[in-house]
């Protein structure tokens, strides 16, 4: 998972993307230390350029693996690519000029489309990398207003692996700080509960919505969910269907509903090609 500083650099670049422009390897993104300081609301400018440079260089060293990168070529199962292809240093102006790698450029456009749902100001003051990740998931699930997810699935999204074997540690170090920061700094409110199977907590239950609006247009009761459930449906699938988002469980983190539809359509085409 990217560090908080790396995520801020990436988000600052995404915020500059013109939805009508065509991105290429020649597209340049200028980021100044002062810009990051203003966005985050810091008072100390002294080390801002050094920290920006360090974050960009760490991002330059990182790679990302993309599954099924080319719907038109289903034989390609994965693509490994760097985030950044070059960095120009302009210390006299306290700024960097970044270029992204060819392999990641198509996904910057997709990230930009998703980014329009949450302006940088809503996540810039987060101090936890998990706050940004949870915020992204809540935006993805926004049509539902509530979501029940497995504890192990959420740990994978946070990339914590076996780091927090005890549920109390996971809540204290990851979930509680993320929920607190989202409620304090963003345009969303969120609360969560948990469900047990026997004596073991297996699922978290999130409720969320936009601040300044009613928390739920209609709260689904447990009785209504049980009554409306179809044979074989999970609780999450019932909630998604009743909320008008039957593709919720098919969605990948960060996808808009339109992107889910498009990916599912491409997958169906790929199945026809392979059949």
Image (spheres, helix red, strand yellow):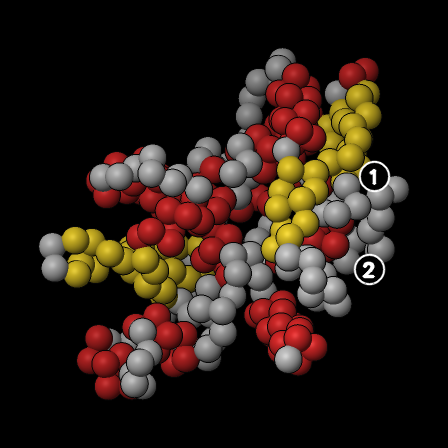
The image quarter containing residue 28 is: top right
Residue drawn at (29%, 56%), measured in percent from left and top? Answer: 204
Residue placed most toward the observer, 255 or 90 = 255
| Residue 127 seen in the current view | yes
The image quarter containing residue 92 is: top right
**Badge 1 is on which residue?**
28
Left or right of residue 38, residue 215 in this image: left
Which circle marks residue 20 in the picture?
2
| Residue 198 location (% of width, % of height) | 12, 59
**Placement of 4 over or under 11, stated as above or below:** above
Residue drawn at (76%, 40%), measured in percent from left and top? Answer: 100
| Residue 74 location (% of width, % of height) | 69, 65
Picture quarter with the C terminus: bottom right
Left or right of residue 224, residue 10 in this image: right
Left or right of residue 62, residue 90 in this image: right
Residue placed most toward the observer, 72 or 28 = 72
Which circle marks residue 143 in the picture?
none
Q: Separation of disc 1 and disc 2 at Cα?
A: 16 Å
Query: Which sits earlier in the primary sequence, circle 1 or circle 2?
Result: 2
Residue drawn at (53%, 46%), measured in percent from left and top? Answer: 122
Of badges 1 and 2, nearer the viewer stands 1
**Placement of 215 over or under 63, stated as above or below:** below
| Residue 219 location (% of width, % of height) | 30, 74
Label 1 Cα neighbours within 10 Å, binned few <14 / some 14-19 / many ≥20: some
The image quarter containing residue 272 is: bottom right
């Amino acid at each position: 998972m990217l560090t908080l500083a790396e995520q801020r650099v990436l988000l600052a670049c995404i915020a500059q993307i013109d939805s009508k422009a065509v991105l290429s390897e020649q597209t340049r993104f200028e980021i100044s230390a002062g810009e990051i300081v203003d966005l985050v609301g810091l008072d100390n400018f002294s080390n801002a350029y050094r920290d920006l440079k360090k974050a960009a260089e760490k991002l330059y060293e990182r790679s990302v693996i993309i599954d099924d990168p080319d719907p038109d070529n289903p034989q390609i199962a994965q693509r490994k690519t760097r985030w950044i292809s070059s960095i120009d240093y302009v210390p006299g102006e306290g700024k960097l000029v970044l270029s992204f790698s060819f392999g990641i450029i198509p996904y910057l456009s997709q990230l930009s489309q998703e980014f329009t749902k949450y302006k940088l100001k809503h996540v810039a003051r987060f101090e936890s990398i998990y706050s940004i990740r949870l915020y992204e998931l809540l935006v993805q699930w926004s049509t539902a207003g509530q979501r029940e997810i497995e504890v192990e699935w959420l740990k994978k999204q946070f990339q914590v692996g076996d780091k927090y074997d005890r549920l109390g540690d996971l809540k204290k170090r990851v979930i509680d700080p993320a929920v607190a920061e989202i409620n304090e700094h963003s345009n969303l409110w969120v609360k969560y509960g948990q469900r047990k199977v026997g004596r073991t907590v297996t699922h978290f239950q999130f409720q969320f919505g936009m601040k300044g609006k009613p928390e739920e247009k209609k709260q689904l009761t447990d009785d209504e969910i049980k009554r409306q459930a179809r044979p074989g449906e999970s609780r999450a699938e019932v909630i998604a269907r009743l909320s008008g988002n039957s593709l919720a469980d098919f969605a990948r983190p960060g996808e808009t509903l339109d992107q889910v539809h498009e990916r599912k359509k491409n997958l169906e085409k790929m199945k026809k090609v392979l059949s």
